[in-house]
Image (spheres, grey):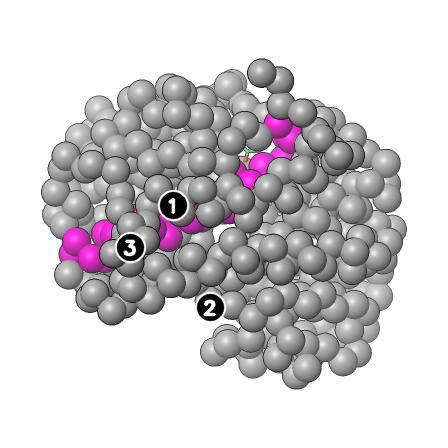
Amino acid sequence: AAVEKGNYRHYMLKEIYEQPTVVAQTLQSYIHQAENRMALPQIDFDLSAIRRVTIVACGTSYYAGMVAKYWFEAFARVPVDIDFASEFRYRDPVLEEGGLALFISQSGETADTLAALRYCKAAGQTVAVVVNVPTSSMAREADLLLPTHAGPEIGVASTKAFTCQLAVLAALAAHLAVKKGRMDRNEEHEVVRHLLEAPAALNAALDHDDDIAAMAHLVAPARDVLYLGRGPDFPLALEGALKLKEISYIHAEGYASGEMKHGPIALIDEAVPVIVLAPSGPLFEKTVSNMQEVRARGGKIVLISDEEGLAEAGEGCLATIAMPRVHPLIAPLVYAVPVQLLAYHVACVKGTDVDQPRNLAKSVTVE
Ligand code: G6P
């Protein structure tokens, strides 16, 4: 049956709002709630023997992979390679025995990602896929199918598939850590607890939709926008910039906060909004000093942080957006919401075709 927009103006907005539900739905199939443990689908190979993870994807799915790299390394202490499918395929990558090749794709049909999957399979890697379409080519060809339960995604710019990918990847990273003896029962319990907090936190983030819609009027006139983030929130800066490009047609760049002084700082003036994604935590102070570098050059900052972060560094910003205070593990899921909503509202201000942006396709089946 055709998917309806319901009361929403666009599919994209509807899909953004579905996130608390579909992330909960996805988590349900990866967590054994009564036992407080990860519960992955039947795996018929020895996960504890995995010595390296190679992540390959395109677009928004690639940024989910970038977040996952932090988790695989922190939890399971396995080295992780990550590349765009269109680069990976042609660079003669070194694939050793004991490698898990992990492909992330909403559609399961992206031509470059599928070709990279076949390449890895032929090279003897164990192939796992995180896909939203369980009947897709990638799903059929994988050794391990890890479905996201986002439901059909119609808006060309990916939103709910992304947060569901993150949910699956966090569960997989924790599960691998358990299998490799890197995570004990209590730590696993904690990860489960934090992951299960995600749906409510996503709801709390959605509560700030009106603030973000108001802020969109400040961003819409900009020709260029800079997005900054650190650690696992750095890929969210990249995703924020991608979303602005995709549907609002604003040139935007995502940068690692600490790397800004090596280049993009030269672009800063009062016409370039700098959007900073900075949940409070151990890395916050460093990001505040990056913000000061921006401010000293007349730059206008939009700070997206929690109450504690805003109290500490919100003053003097062009605008601030409050996020719920969450465990760092789920911050990338929660901060996806303002990033998506901002691009959405800027697109609405500019009157672009949100669900069918020019020149883009939902599923790219050409190489
Ligand atoms: C296209 C879509 C993006 C998507 C990318 C990867 O560019 O417009 O939203 O992130 O393809 O698609 P996949 O289906 O492999 O996740």
Q: Main secondary structure of the magenta part?
A: helix
Q: What residue appears at the point 35 percent right and 28 percent down from the top-left corner? A: 116
Q: Which mark is residue 96?
A: none
Q: Which residue is mark 3?
A: 34
- Disc 1 packing (10 Å; few <14; some 14–19; many ≥20): some
The picture places residue 49, in percent across and down from the top left corner, at 12, 47
- Which quadrant of the figure contains the N terminus? top right
The picture places residue 105, in percent across and down from the top left corner, at 45, 33
* Residue 224 position (above or below residue 149): below
SS state under label 2: loop
224 and 153: which is toward the camera: 153
Q: Earlier in the sequence, mark 3 or mark 2?
A: 3
Q: Amino acid at mark 2?
A: His
Observer-side mark, 3 or 2, equals 3
* Residue 110 position (above or below residue 351): above
Q: Earlier in the sequence, mark 1 or mark 2?
A: 1
Q: What residue appears at the point 73 percent right and 54 percent down from the top-left corner? A: 209
Q: Which mark is residue 327?
A: 2
Give the Cα distance between marks 1 and 2: 19 Å
Q: Is mark 1 within 8 Å of ligand 1?
A: no
Q: What residue appears at the point 62 percent right and 23 percent down from the top-left corner? A: 3
320 and 327: which is toward the camera: 327
Region in magenta: 154-180
Q: Earlier in the sequence, mark 1 or mark 3?
A: 1
The picture places residue 172, in percent across and down from the top left corner, at 31, 48
* Residue 252 position (above or below residue 125): below
Residue 36: image quadrant is bottom left
Residue 227: image quadrant is bottom right
Q: Which residue is mark 1?
A: 28
SS state under label 3: helix
Give the Cα distance between marks 1 and 3: 11 Å
341 and 92: which is toward the camera: 341
